[in-house]
Amino acid sequence: MGKALIIGCGGVASVAIHKCCQNSEVFEEIMIASRTKAKCDALKAKLAGKTKTKIHTAQVDANNVEELTRLIEEFSPAVVLNLALPYQDLTIMEACLAAKTNYVDTANYEPEDTAKFEYKWQWAYRERFEKAGITALLGSGFDPGVTGVFSAYALKHEFDEINYIDILDCNAGDHGYPFATNFNPEINIREVSAKGSYWENGHFVETEPMEIKRVYDFPEIGAKDMYLLHHEELESLALNIPGIKRIRFFMTFGQSYLTHLKCLENVGMTSIEPIDFEGKKIVPLQFLKAVLPDPASLGPRTKGKTNIGCIFRGQKNGQAKTYYLYNVCDHQECYREVGSQAVSYTTGVPAMIGAMLVMNGTWRGPGVRNIEEFDPDPFMAALNKWGLPWQESYSPALVD
Ligand code: NDP
């Protein structure tokens, strides 16, 4: 079918690249380009002889539009899959515009100096992508990503109108460390130490960090504490699901994680304000990232499952209806298959699927689009095929 350029070679990228290599009919050639080329070369060596996909590697600074544009023009891929950090979204989108190449990512843009993520910066590119005749697919991970696809699927097949969505993200994996994060620690801690919020009756309601707590009995896992967080898909689903009255996002955290986080916050280690240290400026959170376990090293030690899904409530044929769609993923099974734990797996698989659907033209529409704006059916079928089968329930327990 064609060529894809993958930017970044961290936890999520590693899974997406394994999956592209399992799907060689679509991904005939890939280029892995990242800041540290040695990581790309090591992954290429690991996959050598196990795939028909031809793998190239390159060094690139994804903050540099000219360097990126040159790389895209030289390789001429059908799609650029951005699996670097949210800080690089805009430079990669600029380069895609310059090289007239489709774009896919898994996280919305966040300026490095303010811990605030919003779609406004990327939505501002709509007209330019439309005029260039290329597609930008935003948020093709699990959440955002599969949660948007689940919402579009529920709306298409199960409801006339959806009024309430609760997105529940449970990670019941145990890595044996008192404190570690399952994906990039800097991005993760910025997300969970921020104020929470949910969408209700046309606007966001802000909460203190971790102010709202619920307990939910997750299928195949059991009862877990979960906390309301702000999350990026709330913003796009609020626009794209007609009739929506409320959307909330909950994530599970264990007590040890929260106690450590509170302590780190109290001593100033989660701050993103640079400080002077022995004549050098350092950002405490970046220093903390350097001393925490690398998420990629958690794979072999993490046991247990994740369960991520959405509970929908709304109307069908004049009757009230409830519907729950979710995926359960086992950390150890992911590790056996691709050498990564389930948090990277549940993001990397949808990233490959989104890139595939844009590449093969199933999802095409010039402009900048969130994932729920596309037909969910081919993505739902691909989830079952590529390792993230979904389950449904018509009588789930509800979150009060
Ligand atoms: P990692 O930190 O493991 O990987 C990031 C990669 O990007 C690294 O290889 C890093 O290079 C590379 N990189 C960083 N800066 C640059 C740069 N300037 N130029 C080139 N390459 C660069 O992160 P994850 O794999 O955990 O996360 C990747 C993305 O996935 C993030 O945007 C994250 O927010 C998103 N995500 C989305 C989820 C979802 O469900 N939607 C869930 C989890 C994550 P180096 O190796 O040199 O550090």
Image (tube, rainbow, N blue to C red):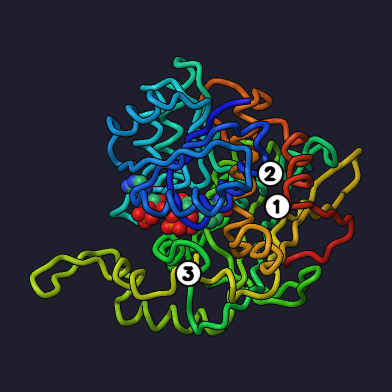
Q: Is residue 278 above or below residue 185?
A: below
Q: Quadrant of the C terminus?
A: bottom right
**Cα distance in 3D space between marks 2 and 1:** 8 Å
Q: Are marks 2 and 1 in contact (CB under 8 Å)?
A: yes
Q: Relative to 225, does residue 93 appear above or below in the rendering?
A: above
The image's mark for residue 165 is 1
Write down the quadrant of residue 59 in the picture.
Answer: top left
Q: Secondary structure at mark 2?
A: loop
Q: Which residue is found at the position 56% from the left and 83% from the top?
A: 176
Residue 85 shows in this picture = no
Q: Who's the residue at 58% across and 52% down the image?
A: 15
Q: Which residue position holds label 2?
A: 244
Q: Residues within 10 Å of mark 1 (few under 14, many from 20)?
A: many
Q: CA distance from mark 3 to mark 1?
A: 21 Å
Q: Residues within 10 Å of mark 3 (few under 14, many from 20)?
A: some
x%, y% of residue 254? 59, 79
Residue 358 coordinates in the image, percent (x, y): 61, 29
